[in-house]
Image (cartoon, grey):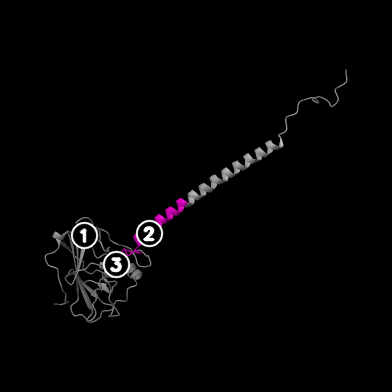
Amino acid sequence: MGNQPRGGRGANKPQPDRPTKTERKDEARAEREQIHARMARRRRSRVGALIVGIAAAAIVIVLVISLSGETGEPGTTPSGTALPGLMTSIAPWGANNDQLAERMAILDLPQFQDNEGHAHARLWIYVHGEQEEVPTDLGFPGDIASPLHTHDTTGTIHIEAVDMSWAPSLGTFFDTWGLRLSSDCIGAYCSQGDDTLQVFVNGEPFEGDPRTISMHELDVVEEVAIVLTYGTDDELPETIPDSFTFGS
């Protein structure tokens, strides 16, 4: 047998070309660019998700504020606590006393006290020209007594609190009742087109927020007469009471 070539088999086998220094730099640059591109895509994804999250949170905040009364809408206290049992339905409306105790606690009403010579207010409500009843025993179901309540269906509101100088607003009465009242809504009826919510106090048009109307004018013999009407101008009642004196 002849001698094997020095170096054994394959000693003369061609070797693969080694990348040049320039080629290695180009490969490293390409890798860095790919890494940077992936990182940029991830950053864009994170930023997009963050923007979506912020937008969703903003929508939730707007909805909460619009429903909460923080902008003056009824249905919550100034702290944003929702009123249980709030009615946003069409008339007629019942006394709605089932969750009265919860609303009283949220509203932080003063304690009821049967005071001789306590104050009163009178409320009339009209929807499309028809008078709607203010229910009897509203705020006074028997097992509990609100300092704002009724004893009949005349619309006479009794104001009986430990502090006889307490001057509640009409909004406080409606919150106690659990019936939505705002500058343009009562129950399910909100101003739109020719149908509007109009308010009269002692016979005079009231242009502000009806929730702010005081139901107890101190040192005034004639007590407050309040008329709320919803509908067109043609549906206004023929007579708007300009005064109210309890027992007269």
Who comes first in sequence, dot 2 or dot 1? 2
- Going 66% across and 40% down the picture, which residue do you hit? 28
Instruction: Give the amino acid at mark 1.
Output: Thr
Task: Residue 43: give x, y in percent of width and height.
Answer: 54, 48
The amino acid marked with disc number 2 is Val
Task: Specify the quadrant of the image occupied by residue 211.
Answer: bottom left
Q: Amino acid at mark 3?
A: Asp
How many angstroms separate mark 3 from mark 2 (CA)? Answer: 18 Å
Of 59 and 208, nearer the camera is 208
Q: Which residue is mark 1?
A: 196
For the residues marked 2 and 1, what is the alpha-carbon distance in whole angstroms?
Answer: 26 Å
Residue on which disc 2 sits: 64
Q: Please, what secondary structure does the residue beneath circle 1 have?
A: strand
Height in image: 50 above or below 22?
below
x and y percentages locating residue 41 in the rendered image: 54, 44
Q: Which residues are magenta?
A: 51-75
- The residue at the point 20 percent across, 64 percent down is 198
Q: Secondary structure at mark 2?
A: helix
Q: Earlier in the sequence, mark 1 or mark 3?
A: 3
Whichever of labels 3 and 2 marks the residue nearer the N terminus, that label is: 2
Tag nearer the camera, 3 or 2: 2
Question: What residue sits right under mark 3 in the picture?
Answer: 175
Provide the major secondary structure of the magenta segment.
Answer: helix
Secondary structure found at label 3? helix
Q: Quadrant of the N terminus?
A: top right
Residue at 48% from the left image edge and 49% from the top image edge: 48
80 left or right of 14? left
